[in-house]
Image (spheres, grey):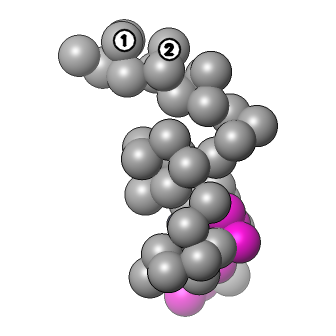
Amino acid sequence: MDSSCEKCHGTGVVKEADGSVHTCWICLAAGRMDTHSKKVDEFKQIKV
Ligand SMILES: [Zn+2]
């Protein structure tokens, strides 16, 4: 994860203004989520 991420600030979790919480899509898409790196690769292949 990237501590400079403006969305999650390195936590990997984004809290929306409405209180909902979800995985940081930016870090996920950038492959910064170590535990999900394999899934991200699969996800990218599906998207592309
Ligand atoms: Zn992030």
Element at label 2: helix
Estimate how packed mark 1 is, as few (under 14), some (14 to 19) or many (20 or more) residues with alpha carbons within 10 Å: few
| Above or below for 26 versus 33 | below
| Above or below for 22 versus 7 | above
SS assignment for the magenta stretch, majority: loop
- Is 6 positioned to the left or the right of 12 in the image? left
- Locate residue 32, reporting x and y percent: 56, 49
Q: Is residue 11 visible?
A: yes
| Above or below for 42 versus 31 | above
| Above or below for 17 versus 27 | below
Residue at 43% of width from left, 57% of height from top? Answer: 26
Q: Nearer the viewer, residue 42 or 20?
A: 42
Estimate how packed mark 2 is, as few (under 14), some (14 to 19) or many (20 or more) residues with alpha carbons within 10 Å: few
The reply to whether the magenta stretch includes residue 14 is yes
- Locate residue 4, reporting x and y percent: 50, 80
Report which residue position mark 1 lands on.
46
Q: What's the magenta region?
A: 11-18
Report which residue position mark 2 lands on.
42
Say which quadrant the N terminus sits in: bottom right
Q: What amino acid does circle 1 point to?
A: Ile
Residue at 30% of width from left, 20% of height from top? Answer: 47
Say which quadrant the C terminus sits in: top left
Element at label 1: helix
Question: CB atoms at circles 2 and 1 under 8 Å apart?
Answer: yes
Residue at 37% of width from left, 22% of height from top? Answer: 44
Q: What amino acid does circle 2 point to?
A: Glu
Q: Nearer the viewer, residue 23 or 18?
A: 23
- Locate residue 15, reporting x and y percent: 64, 78
The reply to whether the magenta stretch includes residue 12 is yes
